[in-house]
Image (tube, rainbow, N blue to C red):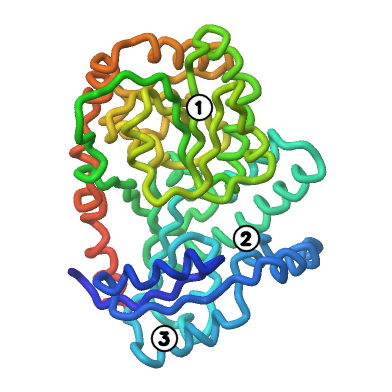
């Protein structure tokens, strides 16, 4: 509605590439570039002695720059919009380097890697610390270079200001598709607990491992009928191995639509220790009618409109208590608890309202 958009996107497999056609009504043209996973892993190990972030070697492709050159030649842009620090190096290279840049960091990824390093054993902890250091240096460069840097929470903005004091930073919070998530039927009896997320993402994997090893046995000791459904694409081997009929644990892998799993559940959980920014999995679960149990760091980043539908706990015992407490409520009580959240304030249209003006101002810098 506000601009003609040329999209250049990395894809990791044929399934991701197949979704490009669904964007025809949203963008003027779409270019997809396949990421060579094994090549990038080898290059990432080779680059460890350098100052290049592993994020940038893993999110790269031989044809990316030539594809960008083709896209720019076909439709020269007034503004470059880089989504996340992983793809942003392209904005510093020809033919984009001289054009106004807006970057959406979403979260400060270097802070995430630093937090992961603190709770991970060597040798991964050493690699994560290196990633935090090298990515922090890049974040300082790219956010200072950008006309505006978008970030999802004020806490993340404060972190980025400490890295790049000269950067112009604007908070634009995440949104959700409220209408499509709203439950379509009255609440039904259920003892299912659901966790949603991409399951090869380190904070999600870490959360589910802690959930199943330390929290879930405490839940099952008091509620033997309770089941746990882990919904999300690309589950690692460690996650796949958790599936257990005896413990009531189901690992779905990729699903075409997450909403039926939310609507069938009684409670959502997000016991995440190291994630940054706003967790959309929590916003979506609440909008789907589920009270949600979270860790304090997740609660502190949630919009005030959502917090009333969530319970925060820090230890395995306290998290299990919160889950069991919600399971022992009636379906109507749980739905009423979720309904205390004011999710209508979180529509994408409302949350992203400042973005067109940000892009228009950047375009005037040409």
Q: Looking at the image, which residue sits at the far front?
A: 245
Local secondary structure at mark 2? helix
Q: Quadrant of the C terminus?
A: bottom left
Crowding near the residue tagged with mark 3, few <14, some 14–19, many ≥20 C-alpha atoms within 10 Å = some
Q: On the picture, is 185 further left or further right than 359?
A: left
**Badge 2 vs badge 1, beta-carbon distance below 8 Å:** no
Measure the C-alpha gap from mark 2 to mark 1: 32 Å
Is residue 111 visible in this depiction of the protein?
Answer: no
Q: On the picture, is 119 further left or further right than 184?
A: right
Residue for point 58% across, 32% down: 208
* Residue nearer the viewer, 25 or 116: 25
User: Which residue has dot 3 on it?
Assistant: 71
Q: Quadrant of the N terminus?
A: bottom left
Position of residue 108 relative to residue 260, above or below, is: below
Residue for point 52% across, 14% down: 320
Residue 307 appears at what percent x and percent y? 32, 26
**Could you say which disc has been placed on residue 228 in the image?**
1
**Could you say which disc has been placed on residue 55 in the image?**
2
Residue 78 appears at what percent x and percent y? 32, 81
């Amino acid at each position: 509605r506000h601009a003609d958009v040329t999209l250049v996107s990395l894809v990791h497999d044929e399934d991701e590439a197949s979704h490009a056609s669904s964007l025809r009504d949203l963008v003027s043209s779409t270019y997809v570039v396949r990421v060579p996973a094994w090549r990038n892993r080898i290059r990432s190990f080779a680059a460890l002695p350098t100052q290049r972030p592993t994020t940038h070697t893993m999110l790269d492709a031989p044809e990316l720059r030539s594809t960008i050159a083709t896209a720019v030649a076909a439709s020269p842009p007034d503004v470059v919009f880089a989504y996340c620090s992983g793809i942003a190096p392209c904005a510093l290279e020809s033919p984009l380097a001289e054009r106004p840049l807006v970057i959406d960091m979403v979260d400060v990824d270097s802070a995430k890697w630093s937090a992961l390093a603190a709770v991970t054993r060597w040798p991964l902890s050493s690699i994560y610390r290196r990633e935090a250091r090298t990515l922090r240096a890049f974040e300082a460069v790219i956010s200072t270079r950008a006309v505006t840097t978008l970030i999802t929470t004020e806490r993340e903005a404060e972190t980025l200001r400490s890295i790049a004091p000269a950067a112009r930073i604007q908070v634009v919070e995440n949104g959700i598709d409220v209408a499509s998530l709203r439950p379509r039927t009255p609440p039904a009896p259920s003892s299912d607990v659901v966790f949603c997320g991409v399951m090869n993402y380190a904070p999600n994997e870490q959360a589910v491992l802690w959930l199943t090893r330390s929290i879930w046995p405490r839940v099952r000791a008091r509620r033997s009928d309770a089941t746990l459904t882990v919904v999300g694409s690309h589950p690692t081997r460690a996650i796949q191995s958790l599936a257990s009929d005896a413990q009531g644990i189901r690992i779905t892998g990729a699903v075409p639509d997450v909403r039926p799993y939310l609507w069938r559940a009684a409670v959502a959980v997000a016991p995440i220790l190291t994630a940054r920014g706003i967790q959309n999995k929590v916003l979506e679960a609440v909008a789907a009618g589920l009270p949600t149990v979270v860790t304090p760091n997740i609660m502190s980043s949630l919009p005030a409109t959502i917090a009333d539908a969530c319970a925060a706990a820090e230890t395995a015992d306290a998290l299990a208590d919160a889950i069991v407490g919600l399971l022992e409520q009636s379906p109507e009580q749980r739905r009423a608890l979720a309904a205390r959240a004011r999710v209508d304030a979180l529509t994408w249209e409302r949350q992203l309202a400042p973005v067109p003006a940000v892009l228009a101002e950047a375009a005037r810098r040409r």
